Structure formats: C-alpha cells, structure tokens
Image (cartoon, rainbow, N blue to C red):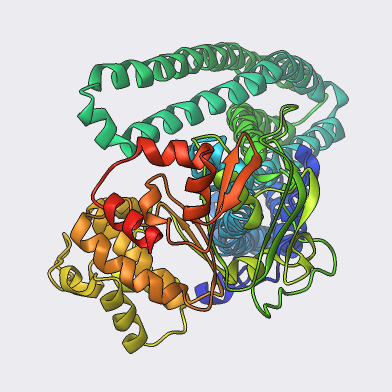
Amino acid sequence: MFRRFEGLVEPTARGTPGEPPDGLLRFYWFFLRQVRWPFAALLTLSLLLALTDAAIPVFVGRVVKLVSEDAPGIADPGAFLAAHWRMLGGMALVLLLVRPVLTLMQTLFQYQAIAPGFTGLIRWQAHWHVVRQSLGFFQNDFAGRIASRVLETGHALRQSLVSTINIIWYMSIYATSALVLMAGSDWRLALPTLGWLACYVGLLALLIPRIRAGSIRLSDAKSRVTGRVVDSYTNILTVKLFARPQEEDAFVRRSLDDHVRLHREQLRRFSVLNIVLTALNMLLVATTTAVALLLWSRGTVGVQEVATVLPLALQITALGSRFAFEVTEIFEQFGVVQEGMRAIARPIAVTDPPGARRLEIRGGAVEFDRIRFGYGREAGVIDGLSLRIAPGEKIGLVGRSGAGKSTLVNLLLRFYDLEGGRILIDGQDIAGVTQESLRAQISVVTQDTSLLHRSIRENILYGRPDAGEAAMLEAARRAHAHDFIQELEDWHGRRGYDAHVGERGVKLSGGQRQRIAIARVILKDAPILILDEATSALDSEIEAAIQEQLEGLMEGKTVIAIAHRLSTIARMDRLVILDRGRIVEQGSHAELLAQGGHYARLWRRQSGGFLGEVEETAAE
C-alpha cells in the first residue's frame, strides 16, 4: 500500500522540464500542474474531513437530547438501545470507520505521495534549470547560496500548498458549516462567531502583510549567512594562510547579527498575534455560552442546540489559533519561495537557438570574425578582433593580464554570447549549434584545475564516460599520474583509483590535480585542444615529461595555448600577441623576436631554465 502511493509522483522520471516562470502564482502553478490529481484528492479529503468534524458536535447535541428526554428509560439500557440503535449505529459508523478511513487516505496522499515525490520533483527540475545557467550566473553569486535556494524552495513550496489545503481550506469549510448549523438553530447563536470572524480577519489583515514582508527579509538574511559561512569554508586554506580568523568571524557575525535582529522582529509580530488571538478566543467561548444559555432560559432553543454550539465554538477557537500560526508559516514559506525564485525563475542567458544542430568537425578550423564583447560594459574587452586558425595549426596566445586571452577562449566555448561578429568552426557558426556538441569537440586544461568530489576513476572517466578501464589507465600513465594514484588512500579506506579526492580535489596537491585533469583530456581526445597554463602547477621534471605527452596529444589537433611563461609556447606554429582586446602582432617566435615589438619586449623580461634551449632551437 505504501509503495503504491509512493510511486504516484516520480521526481526524476518526467521529460525535459520547461523554464520556471517568474511571478509567484505562475511559479507555483508550473510545478503544481504536474501533480494535479494527488493535490485534488488531498483537497477533496480535506473537505470531507471538515464536514465530518463539523457533524461530531451535532452528534453530541443529539445524544444529550436523547439522554435528557429519555432519562427514565436509561435504567433499561436494552430498551434505550432498541429505540435508538439506528441513529447511534450511524454515529458510530462515522466515528469509527468513515473518519479513520478519511484520515488514512489523507495521510497516504500527504506523506507518501506528495511530501517526498513533489519536494523531489521541485528540487530536481530547479536544479536541472539552474545547472544550465551561463558561467556568469555562477560567478555572480555564492554556490552555497544557490544550492540553498534550490533545496529549500522545494520544501517551502510543497509545505505551503499542503498547509493551505489542510488548514485554510479545512478551516473555511468547518467555519462555514458551523455558522450554518448555529444559524439553523437560531440566527442569534451565530452572532458571536460572526463577530469573532470579523475581528479575526481584521487582525490577520493587519499583521499578515507585515509578517510576509518580514519573512522575505528573514529568508534573504538566512541566505546571506549561508553564503558567507560556505564562502569561509570553501576558502579555508586562504583564511589560514593569511591568519584571518577574526576577519572571517566579523564577516559572518555581521550577517548573523542581522539575521537575529530580523528574527526577533518577526517573533514580536507572532507574540502580538498570539496574545490578541487568545483574548478573542476566550471572548468567543464566553459570548457563545452566554447567548446559548440566555436563549435556552427563554425556551427559544433546547438542550440539544446548547450542547451543539458550545463544542463548535471551542473547536473554532482551537482551529483559529492553529490557522493563524499556519498562515504565518505559509507566508514564511512564500518568502522562501520568492527568494528561491531569484535563482530558479531566471531565463538562461546562453541558450541553444530553435533547431540548433550538432557541430560536425571536419578539420578543426577556427575563425574569429570581427568579434566584439565586453561583459555588457560600454568599454569592450574585445573589439573587432579577427583571427583564422587553420586545421591542425597550433597557436599561442600571448599578452598581459587583462589583454583578452581567457575571454577569447570563453567565447570559443560559448560561455557567453557575442555582442557582435561571429565565431566559426569548420565554417559553422557556433551560435547555431548545440552547446553540448560544441564543448564535446573541445578539450580544455586550465591553470586552476578543480576536480569533482568523487573517485579518481570517475574524475578521469568524466572525459569519456564510455571508455573502458584499460583506456582510463593508459591515459593516467601518459599523464604521469598512475604511480601516485596507486599510493592514495582516502579517509574511508578507499585506495588507488577508488579513492575520493575531496571537494574540488583538496586532498591532492596542485600538481596531482593537474595531472588527473590532463589524463581526463587525454581520454577525451577532442579535435580542438585549449591549454590555459596547463603545466603551471607542475615541477620542472614532471613538466618536461608531460610536455612530451602534450606534444603527442597535440598531433593532428587544432591547439590554442595560453601561457605567461613564454618558453612553454615558443615552439607553437604561430604566436598571436593581444593587447587590450586587439591583435597587435602575430608570427613565429623567431619572426616576432626579429620585429622587436611587444613580444620581443616580453621575451627579454623573462628568464629561466627553458630560455637558452628555446633560443637555440629558434636559431636552428
């Protein structure tokens, strides 16, 4: 039975999710419409439960009337039961069968079907959308805060919907039924409840907007605390290297103090709500009792009506207290959802156009055709740059920091859309092909290598998941990583290729991470290769060995290499010198030295173990 209900909502079994819309109601409906009928069942069950619970005080009143009218007959229980068994049996059926079955079904839908499945569905689809955002999206926020928003939004959205049905909808049905029952006996019996409702609605109208606004501010403050704490933990090495724990304390303390201040303000509103509501509830019970007794003393209503309206009034006060705080919780959840929408309900900046085709590589020719880009600023980083790279040609990009080298690579990978011009690969505009097919044809080794918090085997196979064990091991050997991998053991006792590397690979040295990243690229074996300071984290002996492997890897590929150490790229077919987003020189190492321009000046400033060797090679 449990499994049947648990299988009603499968979070990850649906097709490609759409784009979550902006606007609170549309955002809710985007997810709710996917599981309409379990929520419709919950809505119906809540309605039936409210009507059943409203009938219970009527049963009590009816039994009191029977007992009071037939007091002598109670001495003979058999005769009393024989006279009223049908009505008493009907009451027992409702209390012992109907009410428990309704509760059972409500529990199964709420806790087995909706709670895990719907929450998981929201989280999965939100993650699916967020992970496809552009690189700039993640560079402009804390990763911890984005993750917090994705995960908390799922719980908040589901809980607010369930609470709305179980409390607001239930309370509305129950209160309406109670008023009908009271007015059916005597319209004056309903007056205290109507007065209570008017004061109750006024109280909520006064406090709920303030609670809602406070919830949004409180949720935002909580995200800031999470973001700052995660930022400190993520960069713990920097914190310790610079001996700055006190500065980190202050950094987190400011956001935490702000969160505590907002939390206290919010709890003041709850305290006012609780105090005023308690007074209103007691007033309702007192006035309802007084009116019922007054009418009974005048003979206008009987004991049955008195015995019915008093439990109804007591139940309304209990529901009213629960309703008020559930409503505040619901609005707190609305605040969390609205805050989560800032990360989830945002259009993806870099998208595949309709009908985008797969990139087909024939030779690997790359052409930058009068491209312009400036990260949205008026003063562009790259302005009118044109560059043609022949199939299999190996070029080195040279320039000072900020010259546009990494930006050029990011544009080729289509992490950002161009502001002008176009980039072609084998004559195909990359803006018209799918991003996945584009990046599948390009291998990248960067200076700041980060690894997934998984096993070394999984990290290397990330380059080509369908590769076999033998191919993976061969790639590790070619990257000079196999020997140190064999000696690794993580904190759970996993050894060798099964050892996990820690978050971003923190369990490994920079050189070890770099060699695993190179092994991953060797395994991927894409026709276009980008080397961005690929050997900067390696010692000289390992670098010399890996340079040989990289030279083999570069055979037959189009290569774009970036290196501040010019000796590592001097053997490239062509060097392209960038300055402020423009090409100022290009040619071979020897040709550029002979020109005596930008490159020659940069070369003269550098010295090192590779310098004499490269100069000798250039002379030859």
Residue 326 vertical placement versus 8 (above, below): above
Q: Say which quarter of the image contains residue 206.
A: top right
- Along the line of sight, the residue nearer the viewer: 373 or 392: 392
Is residue 54 something that shows in the picture? Answer: yes
Residue 112 vertical placement versus 29 (above, below): below
Residue appearing at x 36%, y 52% in the figure: 567
Residue appearing at x 59%, y 72% in the figure: 441
- Along the line of sight, the residue nearer the viewer: 565 or 99: 565
- Along the line of sight, the residue nearer the viewer: 383 or 466: 383
- Along the line of sight, the residue nearer the viewer: 215 or 135: 135
Which quarter shows the C terminus? bottom left
Residue 258 vertical placement versus 612 (above, below): above
Q: Say which quarter of the image contains residue 580.
A: top right
Residue 356 point in image, percent of width and height: 80, 68
Q: Say which quarter of the image contains residue 54.
A: top right
Residue 407 vertical placement versus 255 (above, below): below
Residue 145 point in image, percent of width and height: 50, 37
Residue appearing at x 31%, y 36% in the figure: 233
Q: Viewed as shown, does residue 303 lie left or right of 555? A: right
Residue 166 point in image, percent of width and height: 65, 45
Q: Viewed as shown, does residue 308 lie left or right of 527? A: right
Residue 281 point in image, percent of width and height: 62, 19
Is residue 500 something that shows in the picture? Answer: no
Q: Viewed as shown, does residue 383 lie left or right of 601? A: right
